[in-house]
Amino acid sequence: MPEIQLLRPDHAPALLAFEQENRTYFAASIPDRGDEYFARFSERHSALLAEQQAGDCYFHLLVGAGGEVLGRVNLLDVADGGADLGYRIAERATGRGLATWAVREVCGLAANRYGLTTLRAGATLDNAASRAVLTRSGFTVVGERQFSSGPGLSYLRGLADFAAPSGAQASP
Protein backbone atom coordinates (compact mmCIF):
# COMPACT_ATOMS: atom_id res chain seq x y z
CA MET A 1 0.00 0.00 0.00
CA PRO A 2 1.11 3.56 -0.53
CA GLU A 3 1.88 5.81 2.40
CA ILE A 4 -0.50 8.55 3.52
CA GLN A 5 1.41 11.78 4.01
CA LEU A 6 0.24 15.17 5.18
CA LEU A 7 0.78 17.75 2.43
CA ARG A 8 4.23 19.38 2.49
CA PRO A 9 5.95 22.04 0.36
CA ASP A 10 8.14 19.43 -1.37
CA HIS A 11 5.06 17.53 -2.62
CA ALA A 12 4.30 20.28 -5.15
CA PRO A 13 5.97 18.75 -8.25
CA ALA A 14 4.48 15.28 -7.74
CA LEU A 15 1.06 16.71 -6.89
CA LEU A 16 1.03 18.90 -9.99
CA ALA A 17 2.01 15.89 -12.13
CA PHE A 18 -0.83 13.86 -10.54
CA GLU A 19 -3.40 16.58 -11.27
CA GLN A 20 -2.18 17.09 -14.85
CA GLU A 21 -2.00 13.38 -15.69
CA ASN A 22 -5.51 12.74 -14.36
CA ARG A 23 -7.26 15.94 -15.40
CA THR A 24 -9.39 14.39 -18.14
CA TYR A 25 -10.18 11.34 -16.02
CA PHE A 26 -11.33 13.48 -13.07
CA ALA A 27 -13.33 15.83 -15.30
CA ALA A 28 -15.47 12.88 -16.41
CA SER A 29 -17.02 12.63 -12.93
CA ILE A 30 -16.36 15.93 -11.10
CA PRO A 31 -16.06 19.54 -12.26
CA ASP A 32 -12.72 20.36 -13.90
CA ARG A 33 -10.37 22.55 -11.87
CA GLY A 34 -9.87 24.85 -14.86
CA ASP A 35 -6.76 26.24 -16.51
CA GLU A 36 -6.28 28.86 -13.78
CA TYR A 37 -5.65 26.10 -11.20
CA PHE A 38 -2.69 24.81 -13.20
CA ALA A 39 -1.38 28.25 -14.18
CA ARG A 40 -1.28 29.33 -10.52
CA PHE A 41 -0.48 25.96 -8.97
CA SER A 42 2.44 27.21 -6.84
CA GLU A 43 0.27 29.92 -5.29
CA ARG A 44 -2.55 27.45 -4.69
CA HIS A 45 -0.16 24.96 -3.09
CA SER A 46 1.14 27.65 -0.71
CA ALA A 47 -2.43 28.64 0.17
CA LEU A 48 -3.31 25.02 0.99
CA LEU A 49 -0.30 24.75 3.26
CA ALA A 50 -1.36 27.94 5.06
CA GLU A 51 -4.92 26.59 5.55
CA GLN A 52 -3.46 23.37 6.90
CA GLN A 53 -1.11 25.23 9.25
CA ALA A 54 -4.10 27.17 10.59
CA GLY A 55 -5.99 23.91 11.24
CA ASP A 56 -8.78 24.83 8.82
CA CYS A 57 -8.10 21.88 6.50
CA TYR A 58 -5.88 18.80 6.32
CA PHE A 59 -4.60 17.63 2.95
CA HIS A 60 -3.35 14.05 2.63
CA LEU A 61 -1.53 12.48 -0.29
CA LEU A 62 -1.27 8.81 -1.11
CA VAL A 63 2.36 8.47 -2.09
CA GLY A 64 3.70 5.40 -3.89
CA ALA A 65 7.09 3.77 -3.37
CA GLY A 66 8.63 5.91 -6.13
CA GLY A 67 7.35 9.18 -4.65
CA GLU A 68 4.48 9.47 -7.14
CA VAL A 69 1.12 10.75 -5.94
CA LEU A 70 -1.59 8.14 -6.39
CA GLY A 71 -4.39 10.03 -4.71
CA ARG A 72 -5.59 12.70 -2.34
CA VAL A 73 -7.89 12.56 0.67
CA ASN A 74 -8.71 15.96 2.11
CA LEU A 75 -10.49 17.15 5.22
CA LEU A 76 -11.98 20.56 4.48
CA ASP A 77 -13.72 23.23 6.53
CA VAL A 78 -12.69 21.77 9.88
CA ALA A 79 -14.93 23.23 12.61
CA ASP A 80 -16.99 22.15 15.60
CA GLY A 81 -15.64 18.59 15.59
CA GLY A 82 -16.45 17.94 11.95
CA ALA A 83 -15.07 18.32 8.44
CA ASP A 84 -15.94 17.68 4.81
CA LEU A 85 -14.12 14.74 3.24
CA GLY A 86 -13.09 14.77 -0.40
CA TYR A 87 -10.87 12.41 -2.36
CA ARG A 88 -9.58 11.55 -5.79
CA ILE A 89 -7.52 8.59 -6.94
CA ALA A 90 -5.33 8.38 -10.04
CA GLU A 91 -6.92 6.52 -12.91
CA ARG A 92 -4.08 3.98 -12.99
CA ALA A 93 -4.62 3.20 -9.29
CA THR A 94 -8.39 2.58 -9.36
CA GLY A 95 -10.14 -0.74 -8.97
CA ARG A 96 -7.82 -2.08 -6.25
CA GLY A 97 -9.56 -0.85 -3.10
CA LEU A 98 -7.11 2.01 -2.66
CA ALA A 99 -9.81 4.68 -2.26
CA THR A 100 -11.66 2.70 0.41
CA TRP A 101 -8.42 1.97 2.27
CA ALA A 102 -7.32 5.61 2.11
CA VAL A 103 -10.69 7.00 3.21
CA ARG A 104 -10.74 4.63 6.20
CA GLU A 105 -7.18 5.59 7.12
CA VAL A 106 -8.01 9.28 7.00
CA CYS A 107 -11.11 8.63 9.13
CA GLY A 108 -8.73 7.24 11.75
CA LEU A 109 -6.47 10.28 11.45
CA ALA A 110 -9.50 12.57 11.69
CA ALA A 111 -10.52 10.99 14.99
CA ASN A 112 -7.15 10.39 16.60
CA ARG A 113 -4.86 13.10 15.27
CA TYR A 114 -7.28 15.96 14.63
CA GLY A 115 -9.90 15.22 17.30
CA LEU A 116 -12.86 15.17 14.91
CA THR A 117 -16.07 13.32 15.67
CA THR A 118 -17.94 13.45 12.33
CA LEU A 119 -17.18 13.68 8.64
CA ARG A 120 -19.47 14.83 5.86
CA ALA A 121 -19.12 13.85 2.20
CA GLY A 122 -21.05 13.97 -1.02
CA ALA A 123 -21.13 12.23 -4.37
CA THR A 124 -23.10 12.74 -7.55
CA LEU A 125 -25.66 10.13 -8.52
CA ASP A 126 -23.69 9.23 -11.64
CA ASN A 127 -20.49 8.55 -9.65
CA ALA A 128 -21.28 5.00 -8.50
CA ALA A 129 -17.64 4.26 -7.61
CA SER A 130 -17.43 7.19 -5.20
CA ARG A 131 -20.77 6.33 -3.62
CA ALA A 132 -19.55 2.73 -3.13
CA VAL A 133 -16.33 3.93 -1.47
CA LEU A 134 -18.31 6.06 0.97
CA THR A 135 -20.71 3.23 1.79
CA ARG A 136 -17.87 0.71 2.28
CA SER A 137 -16.14 3.25 4.54
CA GLY A 138 -19.12 3.51 6.89
CA PHE A 139 -20.77 6.68 5.60
CA THR A 140 -24.56 6.75 5.48
CA VAL A 141 -26.80 8.73 3.19
CA VAL A 142 -28.44 11.63 5.03
CA GLY A 143 -30.03 13.51 2.17
CA GLU A 144 -29.95 14.73 -1.37
CA ARG A 145 -27.93 17.65 -2.67
CA GLN A 146 -27.21 19.46 -5.88
CA PHE A 147 -23.68 19.69 -7.27
CA SER A 148 -22.63 21.92 -10.15
CA SER A 149 -22.32 18.72 -12.19
CA GLY A 150 -25.72 17.31 -11.22
CA PRO A 151 -27.80 15.75 -8.47
CA GLY A 152 -26.14 13.82 -5.68
CA LEU A 153 -26.30 12.51 -2.16
CA SER A 154 -24.99 13.81 1.15
CA TYR A 155 -23.28 11.40 3.52
CA LEU A 156 -22.30 11.46 7.18
CA ARG A 157 -20.01 9.30 9.27
CA GLY A 158 -19.45 9.35 13.01
CA LEU A 159 -15.89 8.59 14.09
CA ALA A 160 -16.45 7.06 17.55
CA ASP A 161 -15.29 3.63 16.33
CA PHE A 162 -11.94 5.17 15.29
CA ALA A 163 -11.31 7.03 18.55
CA ALA A 164 -8.34 5.90 20.60
CA PRO A 165 -9.31 3.81 23.65
CA SER A 166 -9.88 5.70 26.91
CA GLY A 167 -6.56 6.70 28.45
CA ALA A 168 -4.69 6.48 25.13
CA GLN A 169 -3.32 9.68 23.69
CA ALA A 170 -3.77 10.76 20.10
CA SER A 171 -0.53 11.05 18.19
CA PRO A 172 0.57 14.59 17.29
Image: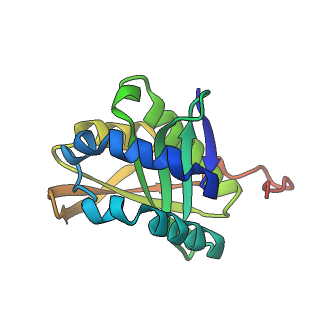
Residue 76 as seen in the image, left or right of residue 164: left
Q: Residue at x 54, y 57 (%)?
A: 59
Image quarter where the N terminus lies is: top right
- Residue 98 lies, in percent from the top left, at 47, 31
Give the residue at the far right of this rendering.
Answer: 167
Q: Is residue 58 left or right of residue 167?
A: left
Viewer-closest of 47 and 122: 47
Residue 31, given in percent of the width and then of the height, sits at 22, 56
Depicted 54 relative to depicted 144: above or below: below
Residue at 52% across, 61% down = 118
* Quarter placement of the C terminus: bottom right
Q: Quadrant of residue 34?
A: bottom left
Nearer the observer, 111 or 16: 16
Q: Position of residue 123 (x, y in %)?
A: 27, 51
Instruction: State whether residue 147 appears in this view.
Output: yes
Q: Residue at x 51, y 43 (%)?
A: 14
Residue 108 lies, with reference to residue 46, above or below; the image says: above
Q: Position of residue 38 (x, y in %)?
A: 35, 58
